[in-house]
Structure formats: C-alpha cells, structure tokens
Amino acid sequence: MKFTTTLLLALTAIVSAAPQPGSSEVDARQECVYDCGCSSGSGEPSPPPDTATCCASVGGTLGNGGTLCNGLSFTQGTSYARCCASPGFVCFAPSGCTPITV
C-alpha cells in the first residue's frame, strides 16, 4: 500500500510539473506557421535540389516556384532545417515568431 501511495504521489508531481496548454511555459513557436527554403549558398536564382526532397519528407507544400516549403509547424520546420543543413535562417514566419535556424 505504501508503494502504491508513493507511486501515485510521484505521478501527480510529474503531471503537475509539465507545462499546461495556455500557460506562459508553452513554447509560442508551436502556434507559428513557417515557410522554409534550402539555401544554395551560391546566390543562384534556381532552388537547390534538396528543397523539394526536404519539403516532401516533412509533408509541406512547395510554393514560390519551388523555392519554398510552405505551411510547416515548428516541428516540421525544425526537421526541414535539419534536412537542408543550410547555414543561417532557413525558416521564417509572421512577426512574433522566432525563425528556425541551423
């Protein structure tokens, strides 16, 4: 019985320590919608070849003539940025949302 009580108290402590939806502890970036692009690094006007591949891998929608992957969540944008491995800002969103960088 003592073990069960201790276990229940431990679980209660863990649940109450987790960030609650709507609280200031929830990462605001989770609410943002990102548009991302892989950088060619050479300033070429054509999109780098991994833009479409990375966009498809995260379930985004190609836009802007195939140069951007649109409509990504923070998690998708982070995965996209890792796929591109482009230096600097690769994902941006409306003001108030922090860009995703690699």
Image: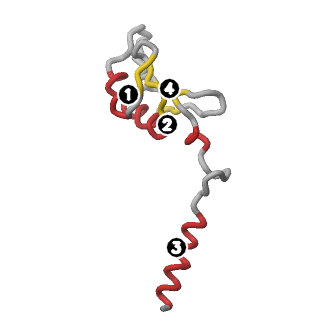
- The reply to whether residue 88 is in sight is no
- Cα–Cα span, label 2 and label 1: 12 Å
Earlier-in-chain disc, 1 versus 3: 3
Earlier-in-chain disc, 2 versus 1: 1
- Cα–Cα span, label 2 and label 4: 9 Å
- Judging from the image, what secondary structure is the residue with disc 4 in? strand
Of residue 22 and residue 99, the one placed in the foreground of this image is 22
Q: Amino acid at mark 4?
A: Asp
| Circle 3 residue | 11
* Pointer 3 local density, CA inside 10 Å: few below 14, some 14–19, many at least 20: few
| Circle 2 residue | 73
Earlier-in-chain disc, 2 versus 4: 4
Q: Is residue 25 above or below residue 66?
A: below
- Cα–Cα span, label 1 and label 4: 10 Å
Q: Amino acid at mark 2?
A: Ser
- The reply to whether residue 54 is in sight is yes
- Judging from the image, what secondary structure is the residue with disc 2 in? loop
- The answer to whether the residues at label 1 and label 3 have Cβ atoms under 8 Å apart is no
Earlier-in-chain disc, 3 versus 2: 3
Q: Residue at x 50, y 90 (%)?
A: 2
* Residue 55 image label: 1
Q: Amino acid at mark 3?
A: Leu
| Circle 4 residue | 35
- Judging from the image, what secondary structure is the residue with disc 3 in? helix
Q: Quadrant of residue 93?
A: top right
Q: Residue at x 48, y 91 (%)?
A: 1
Q: Residue at x 39, y 29 (%)?
A: 85
Image coordinates for residue 26, horizontal then vertical, percent:
61, 50
- Cα–Cα span, label 1 and label 3: 39 Å
- The answer to whether the residues at label 3 and label 2 have Cβ atoms under 8 Å apart is no
Residue at the top extreme, as displayed: 45
Of residue 22 and residue 54, the one placed in the foreground of this image is 22
